[in-house]
Image (cartoon, rainbow, N blue to C red):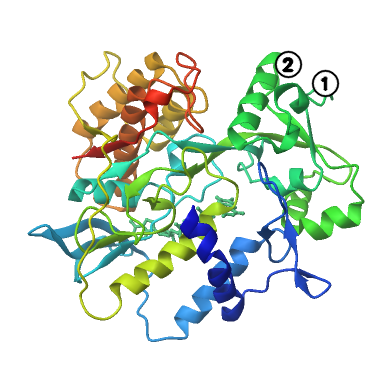
């Protein structure tokens, strides 16, 4: 956290200098508030299209250089020799051929694993690839049980769970149940701006209580021109679905959003394998604890990305070890008895399984069913041959790592909630680290 706050200003200045057009008010960068924040500190661009503006600005800069970008290639294996990285194997998705690339350093930046769950805000490429590749190569994977669910994704039949940004609540949005009752003050003093896990579980309770499959997020009290200019993407997306959010409340429900755990790295982005680095959502820097604060992830990508550049630039530098933590619990995957009822692996079945058994509210019985099913699939999956089969195998492995860690953690903490262990226990103030 100290690194994040100390280096944030410089890294944001980098983005401004690279040309990211952050929104301004009276000549100064405009800041907004998000859940569990004590001050407005969130920059935005194009209203609610910040990520798109950052990504387009940076990718334009990359394409203007000599950097070789290989589109439609999927990294499938990390090549390791004598304990150090020496390259990567990849599938050319256009003709399903395999290629190998050599290198002294490899930086994993493959993003999250939201495709593990039936409802997710993540893009379809968030299939946990980097976690699976690193695990198979022998790297340490940590904190997998902490998966953050965003409380407010659009829930309309047949429509993707489009994210309704936290800043809608930051700007005054109110959560109501299907009867129109504002319920959040009953659950938390910060009401709609309570931490994400609290809001997500509160919405689930209200959905169960009222028999609805969504709650309602109401911003109809804001002046329509403010809603349309501050949230243009949300406004237009909903309008395309026949929903005018300046006049009607938005049907919302929780969805899987952010993998807090991942490939364990030190403060320089180094993994437990020499030459292998990880940055972004695939990495577990520890900065998010057990419950990521809204909008800290892009900052983490920038700060650790820059640190990795410093570490890998120029001559080969000695690699610092990941600081050993006496309190860590080390786990390796054991064989599990496959469940009696055989279910064949496919993406939708996997997503339903994890949503039902390893989602927002977990218990031992459900988690064990999920772990046994995934263990059975790990043994029965054929050798992958194309993009979707590689991604499915990676999801099965990432899901197994998540469920095994969740079974072991006999408490509730942050994004990990166990109905059979509903309290936080000081004895569990430790990381679960999994290796092959
Ligand atoms: C809807 C939404 C809104 C969000 N809003 C915010 C926010 O406001 N503030 C904030 O801080 N965070 C936010 N987050 C989280 C944040 O955007 C992500 O954590 C962050 O973008 C992850 O960046 P990344 O570079 O790690 O991964 P990504 O941006 O997901 O990039 C990963 C890339 O790796 C590629 N890839 C994956 N597997 C392979 C493979 N095997 N081989 C080759 N390439 C591969 C993918 O195709 C993709 O291009 C949001 C997330 C979502 C989904």
Residue that appears at 36% across and 46% down? 262
- Dot 2 or dot 1, earlier in sequence: 1
Between residues 154 and 82, which one lies in front from this camera angle?
Answer: 82
The x, y position of residue 8, in whole percent, is 55, 64
Look at the numbered discs 2 and 1 and tell me whether their residues touch, using CB distance below 8 Å.
yes
Which residue lies under the disc numbered 2? 210
Give the SS element for disc 1: loop
Residue that appears at 36% across and 58% down? 267
Q: Is residue 70 visible?
A: no
The x, y position of residue 278, in whole percent, is 34, 58
237 on left or right of 7: right
Residue that appears at 57% across and 36% down? 255
Q: Identify the image quadrant of residue 111.
A: bottom left
Q: Is residue 429 visible?
A: yes
Q: Which mark is residue 190?
A: none
Residue that appears at 35% across and 73% down? 310
The x, y position of residue 297, in whole percent, is 52, 54
Between residues 389 and 17, which one lies in front from this camera angle?
Answer: 17
Q: Which mark is residue 179?
A: 1
The x, y position of residue 272, in whole percent, is 22, 52
């Amino acid at each position: 956290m100290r690194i994040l706050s100390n280096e944030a200003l410089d890294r944001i200045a980098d983005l401004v200098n690279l040309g990211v057009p952050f929104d301004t008010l009276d000549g100064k960068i405009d800041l907004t508030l998000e859940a569990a924040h004590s001050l407005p500190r969130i920059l935005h661009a194009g209203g609610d299209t910040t990520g798109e503006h950052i990504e387009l600005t940076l990718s334009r800069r990359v394409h203007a250089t000599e950097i070789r970008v290989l589109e439609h290639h999927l990294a499938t294996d990390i090549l390791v020799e004598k304990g150090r990285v020496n390259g990567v194997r990849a599938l050319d998705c256009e003709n399903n051929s395999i290629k190998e690339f050599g290198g002294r350093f490899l930086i994993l930046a493959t993003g999250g694993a939201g495709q593990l769950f039936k409802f997710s805000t993540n893009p379809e490429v968030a299939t946990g690839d980097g976690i699976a590749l690193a695990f198979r190569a022998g790297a340490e994977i940590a904190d997998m049980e902490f998966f953050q669910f965003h409380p407010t994704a659009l829930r309309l039949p047949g429509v993707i769970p489009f994210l309704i940004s936290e800043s809608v609540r930051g700007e005054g949005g109110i959560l109501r149940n299907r009867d129109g009752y504002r319920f959040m003050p009953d659950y938390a003093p910060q009401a709609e701006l309570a931490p994400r896990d609290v809001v997500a579980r509160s919405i689930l309770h209200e959905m169960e209580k009222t028999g609805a499959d969504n709650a309602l997020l109401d911003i109809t009290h804001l002046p329509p021109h403010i809603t349309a200019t501050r949230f243009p993407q949300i406004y237009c997306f909903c309008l395309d679905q026949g929903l005018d959010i300046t006049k009607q409340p938005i049907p919302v429900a929780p969805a899987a959003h952010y993998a807090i755990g991942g490939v364990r790295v030190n403060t320089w982005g180094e993994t437990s394998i020499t030459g292998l680095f990880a940055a972004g959502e695939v990495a577990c820097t520890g900065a998010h604890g057990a419950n990521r604060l809204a909008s800290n992830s892009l900052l983490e990508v920038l700060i650790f990305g820059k640190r990795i550049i410093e570490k890998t630039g120029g001559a080969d530098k000695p690699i610092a070890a990941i600081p050993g933590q006496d309190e860590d619990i080390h786990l390796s995957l054991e064989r599990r008895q496959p469940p009696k009822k055989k279910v064949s692996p496919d993406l939708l079945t996997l997503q339903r399984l994890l949503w039902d058994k390893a989602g927002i509210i977990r218990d031992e019985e459900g988690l064990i069913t999920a772990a046994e099913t995934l263990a059975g699939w790990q043994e029965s999956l054929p050798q992958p041959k194309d993009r979707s089969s590689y991604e499915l195998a990676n999801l099965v492995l990432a899901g197994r790592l998540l469920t095994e860690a969740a079974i072991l953690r006999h408490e509730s903490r942050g994004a990990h909630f166990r109905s059979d262990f509903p309290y936080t226990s000081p004895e569990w103030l430790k990381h679960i680290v999994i290796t092959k």
